[in-house]
Image (cartoon, coloured by chain):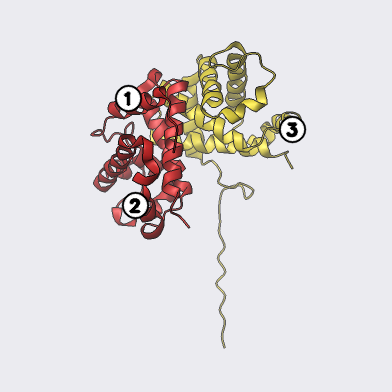
Chain colours: A yellow, B red
Amino acid sequence: LHFSFLVVKTTSNRNPTDKMSLSAKDKNTVKAFWANVVGMEEDIGCDAVSRMLTVYPQTKIYFSHWKDLSPGSAPVRKHGATVMTAVTDAVSKIDDLTGGLLSLSELHAFTLRVDPANFKVLAHNLLVVLAIVFPNDFTPEVHVAMDKFLAAVARALSEKYR
Amino acid sequence: MVAWTDFERATIKDIFSKIDYECNLFKCSCFLRCLIVYPWTQRYFAGFGNLYNAAAITSNPKVAAHGKVVMQGLEKAVKNMDNIKATFTELSTLHSEKLQVDPDNFMLLGDCLAIVVAAQLGKDFTPEVHAAFQKFLAVVVSSLRRQYY
């Protein structure tokens, strides 16, 4: 009996620790599209958080300490701005999200203890707002790059959980 | 049976009256968008020809035709809001037994539809309208999953 084993060596320029990583094209698409957001961060963030709390009411449990959870309220607006500042920061750290978001991951893991499934929920609502604000720029290509980016951000935020 | 408020009923009917069915631009077709954003969903459409990239998908006539089939199915649900479960029994069996579609994919299409509707309605897609629409999507998805075993 003769066994031949086919050994395939894959050569790749990609970092071997990447899983479903962002391609150079994805990163450029995200950076170019995110430039549109400058100056509108608070409105966009406010709308995204408002929607999350309204459309997915189970997320309200994390904000029971707020006086007012209604769309556009002061705490919602403030938190929307906080989230958007963090996402803008993540865009600037797109080449190393895990390292760049380390302390935010610790915050979410140990202090806030947000179930990581919710990152996807907020991401979806942010995409909905981007589609509303930029109906012509939010093409399917931009959509997939942004979806991948936000999924990568979610993964980086989940790093320290366990 | 699902309990719809008057607001939800009116909102769903209003949304579907406003959707542009003829338009096959990226802004309009949730099916087209789903194939691009979640490329693994292409596995069910091997006979559609060229799905190689976003441009090919956007100009593919079979994709356009199937997009309309999907929307017609949803319209049926809108016309039978009080009994979507029964309305979709055959469709659910079809997706489970013949097409063998992973039911997790239904929500992917749902997410794309929410984004397409948001792009078309703009500011009119308020958080309250969005919530009503999401409830409708959840009922549709649940009805489509029902016959799976």
Which comes sooner in the sequence, label 2 or label 1? 1
Instruction: Identify the residue shown where x is 69% and y is 35%.
Output: A99
Image location of residue B32, percent across then percent down? 34, 41
- Asked whether the residues under marks 2 and 1 belong to the same chain, the reply is yes
- Asked whether the residues under marks 1 and 3 belong to the same chain, the reply is no
Give neighbour class at mark 2: few <14, some 14-19, many 20+ (Cα, 10 Å): few
Residue beneath label 1, please? B14
**Chain label for disc 2:** B
Locate the C terminus of chain A by quadrant: top right
Instruction: Identify the residue shown where x is 35% and y is 50%.
Output: B91
In which quarter of the view is residue A152 placed?
Answer: top right
Type of amino acid under label 3: Glu
Distance CA(mark 1)–CA(mark 3):
44 Å
Type of amino acid under label 2: Glu
- Asked whether the residues under marks 2 and 3 belong to the same chain, the reply is no
SS under mark 1: helix
Q: Nearer the viewer, mark 2 or mark 3?
A: 2
Type of amino acid under label 1: Asp
Give neighbour class at mark 1: few <14, some 14-19, many 20+ (Cα, 10 Å): few
**Chain label for disc 1:** B
SS under mark 2: helix
A107 sits to left or right of A55 = right
Residue beneath label 2, please? B90
Residue beneath label 3, please? A106
